[in-house]
Image: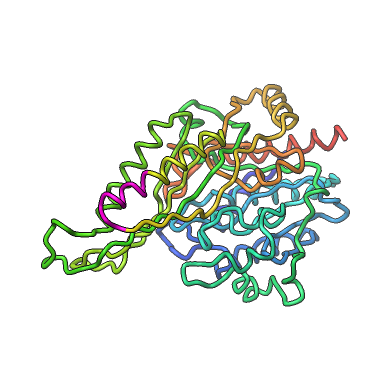
Amino acid sequence: MKINGQRLIDDLKYLREITATPGQGVTRFSYTEEDGRAREYLARIANEYGFSMETDSVGNIRVCPPESKGSLIIGSHIDTVRNGGWLDGIYGVMSGMEVLRTFADNGVHTDAAVMVYAEEEGSVFGSTMTGSKFLTGKYTADDLTALTDDSGVTLKEHLAECGYLTEDASGSSLPLAVNPADIECALELHIEQGPVMDAEGLQIGIVDTVFGMHVLEVTYSGLGNHAGASPMKGRRDSMSAFAEAVLAIEKVALEAGCGVVATIGKVSVSPGGSNVIPDSVRFTVDIRSNDDGHTSDAVERIRKTVCEIADGRNVECAVRDVADSSAIPFSRKVIEGMAALAEEQGIIYKVMDSGAVHDTAMLAPFTDAGMMFVPSINGRSHVPEEDTDEDDLVRGAQFLMDYILRSQSSH
């Protein structure tokens, strides 16, 4: 049984055009018009095949064929970073939809369902995997108001505006799309987002461990003043402190080794005038590794380092913990099953770690969970240049379906 590869590619190309930044990559933030249009496309497919489609109180979606128990979840996300690529997240969702359609086309009963996890990227609220964190209890109703966008609008307000969260659903117990205790297996197909597979000529990557992540927000507050009338000596320049911090943070990560990476990806300068010494600079630091101890050590060194820089430059420093997730190993049963299938099919594969975090990792403590990768050309992702060969995209979806077929037959 073969998936309809052209149908999958056509889906992805259609969804690529649903963006707030035409010609400049894909920008499809959660709870926006673009997000809604992508959801409408999924609904059309579900309606065509008679699949049920429900959206829970935080915006997670479950698409389920008739009579399916939904005990095997195929999940990913449809939101993107700003000016991102056309495959990150959406490839896994549409591959799952293609698997369900292929089963339906061939009269194959399945207990699988597709999950779309809301706000995976954290583009709106600065915290990744929001939907899956609510599903697994890492987030509770209290976080509906604790999470805010850059304008101070809370998650609760966004959800109410979209019609997902009603007044009678805003208590301590949120109606969610699925109970993790009811899931027997959770799978996710994704592009690698890194250079390993492309460089090594691999066709399928089988994920062993997802890196843990800790995000800090650092704010340097100095003294704003006239750029020309203020002598260099004696300035309390928050931008100079930031500049020193950038290289110091890079040094911490390099010296840590053990796969530790640290990234400054978001910076806000106030007041932002070309002729004004900035009075404050706020920036994020994303620290990751496959070992929680190494991640924690790097976080504390960075926390200490940025404060020491502030003291040396006579500016104030505030450090806030924004988000964290532990390194999570996937099911050995799933990893070994995928490896056996790849060998039987003559697929060039590798068992590897994922430096990027993914929603399925949130479900790993509750059930057998696993992920598979297809190559990213030149290792590019989260940029408009993100791309994967169409043959690899089709192969990945076919491998996903073949693994599900084998899993179902073993029960």
Pinpoint residue 17: horizontal percent, then vertical percent: 51, 60
Q: Main secondary structure of the magenta part?
A: helix
Vertical order, 296 against 180 (above or below) = above
Vertical order, 54 against 319 (above or below) = below
Which residue appears at 71% of the width and 67% of the height? 57
| Left or right of 363 in this view: 308 | left
Q: Is residue 199 magenta?
A: no
The quadrant holding residue 275 is: bottom left
Whether residue 17 is visible to the viewer of this picture, yes or no, is no
The quadrant holding residue 354 is: top right
Tell me the quadrant of the picture where the C terminus can be found. top right
Segment colored magenta: 305-315
Vertical order, 331 against 148 (above or below) = above
Q: Is residue 312 magenta?
A: yes
Tell me the quadrant of the picture where the N terminus can be found. top right
Which residue appears at 36% of the width and 61% of the height? 268
Which residue appears at 61% of the width and 57% of the height? 130
Vertical order, 358 against 121 (above or below) = above
Name the foreground residue: 107 vs 285: 285
Pinpoint residue 194: horizontal percent, then vertical percent: 48, 37
| Left or right of 77 in this view: 1 | right
